[in-house]
Amino acid sequence: MNGHGGTHAIDAAVASGVEHLFTLSGAHVFPLYDAAVGGKESVLAAGSPRVAERDGPVRLIDVRHEQTAVFAAEAMGKLTRTPGFAALTAGPGITNGISAITGAFFNGSPLVVLGGRAPDTRWGSGALQELDQPPMLANVTKRAFTIHDPATIRTQVQGAFDLARAPHRGPVFVDVPMDTLFSWSDVPAPTLTVAQQVAPDPDLISAAAEQISNSRHPVVIIGGDVWQGNAVEQAQEFIRGLGLPTITNGMGRGILPPTDPQLVTRARSDAFAHCDLVIVIGTPLDFRLGYGSFGDPPAAVLHLVDSQSQMSYHAPNALTIVGDLGLAMHAIKSAVPRRDFTGWCTQLRDLSLAAIANDHELFADNNSPIHPARIYGDLLPRLTPDSVVIGDGGDFVSFAGKFVEPVQPGRWLDPGPYGCLGTGPGYAMAARLVNPSAPVFLLMGDGAAGFSIMDMESLVRHQLPVVIIIGNNQGWALEKQPMRFLYGYDVIADLPATRYDTIMQALGGDGELVDEAQGIGPALDRAMNSKLPYVVNILTDPEASYPRSTTGI
Ligand SMILES: Cc1ncc(C[n+]2csc(CCOP(=O)(O)OP(=O)(O)O)c2C)c(N)n1
Ligand SMILES: [Mg+2]
């Protein structure tokens, strides 16, 4: 193909299944935009720039802050299991995207970020935004590199996409000097490489099968790599075939529906206190899982990971199996002789159902001020099986994680272990683009809302209606309560009762304030029926904190 660097980069993206490019305009990456819309003739034929942006070979979605471009691209990778794609202009465009790239790195989300770069011909002379960016990204990507030869853009960008989608998935950063990206070259498209599935070690499979057959109280934890690795069916067969009680986290949520008798997420502390084996599949043994230490004396741990980089060396008791998660689960299931864990599983399921039944008191509480949990009393009955729920915030999102149990995988998005506030509008943008007709609910803390509030305008501009529920407790509750606990007082934790709903109206969307419990349901209905992004700004009790048992430290 003959073209400038943008043409070759976009061609590689399209060959990798990319349909959207998230960005904020910068001259260093203009050739990408030119290729995404199909050049000047296509823009003229489209009749308007907005139509051309939408209907080109790759749809251009422009935002108001680069972090939103990367959050949206990351969410594309999370939801579609195809690498997301963002372009950031040189220097500040790229540094603005670093937190979001880091989040993708922690989440193992497939993502390619293409950065602009000052021209090679001027390098060292002090060109605008001249900065050697890959060293800044090296620590938070699978690979960060520069392409200097226009004739290699096609293959090297293709390589970036192949690497991002190979286990263990994650972000790849590549920058291209302006003179290289604007140069023309004629190169053939390379052949696509398909990552080989790594078969797990058969001896370790036998050892794992023996561990399961010898255990009395095993429990399974399913994490996001099971979803990313396309191993949902194998996970369901493994869990159901062996009758194992199961807890889900991150993008693993929804792999078992709430009605499944094996799902015991709400009995998690009882399960960990009394189990003798924890089978952790596709998620690290990090702070969310007590660093891999469950109960006292600690239970044995079987850890299935998709690549060497995911081994947790701090958990010496763990038997770790590296390889394709689907292959590993299938092989272990076939090797375990018939065991009956029904009694143990039923015990945990009953505890789980009892915890869920207990929620109803808070769900029906009509006292003033509104308890944050009360919102779910009206939200849960409105969630359809295809609804996507996104959390961005502190305590408010912990409540969401507790109460919302997705019916299908790929319908729940949280920021993950990096915990960066401000993911919301970007994640919502991707969720709406991927699911044009499913309801999308974005749950935000009032503090979180401030990080990316201007990108609510991007939702309006791109006609992406989303129901945005702000749990407005007038402060940073997740920091306020720990500070009180440690010092007996708190500072810098209070915020005003800001009218985020009228901000949304000013940005072209719609919204309303809710300050009494009976108003929540009707407001949600109006939001869901609106054809616009809609903020339901709910004033909640500043003193009602999430009953937290882990600190993350
Ligand atoms: C970018 C970023 N800055 C700061 C923090 C620290 N932090 C974690 S939770 C939290 C409070 C969030 O407040 P809000 O979104 O209003 O939710 P609430 O806890 O009040 O429900 C803060 C400041 C963070 N995780 N990410
Ligand atoms: Mg708050």
Image: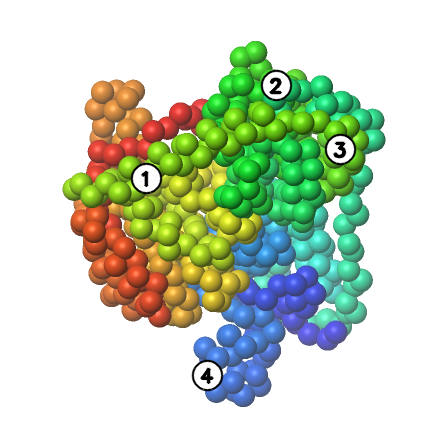
Residue at label 3?
A: 332
Q: Amino acid at mark 3?
A: Ile
Q: Residues within 10 Å of mark 2 (few under 14, many from 20)?
A: many
Q: Between tags 3 and 4, which lies in front? A: 3
* Outermost residue, left side: 368
Query: Residue 86 shows which numbered tag?
Result: none
User: What secondary structure is found at the residue carrying circle 1?
Assistant: helix
User: What secondary structure is found at the residue carrying circle 2?
Assistant: loop
Residue at label 2?
A: 276
Q: Amino acid at mark 1?
A: His
Q: In whole angstroms, how far apart are the C-alphas of marks 2 and 3?
A: 18 Å
Looking at the image, is 286 positioned above or below residue 362?
Answer: above
Which residue corresponds to the image point at 72% horizontal and 71% vertical from the top-left? Answer: 185
Quadrant of the image occupied by residue 499: bottom left
Q: Is residue 414 left or right of residue 7?
A: left
Q: Amino acid at mark 4?
A: Ser
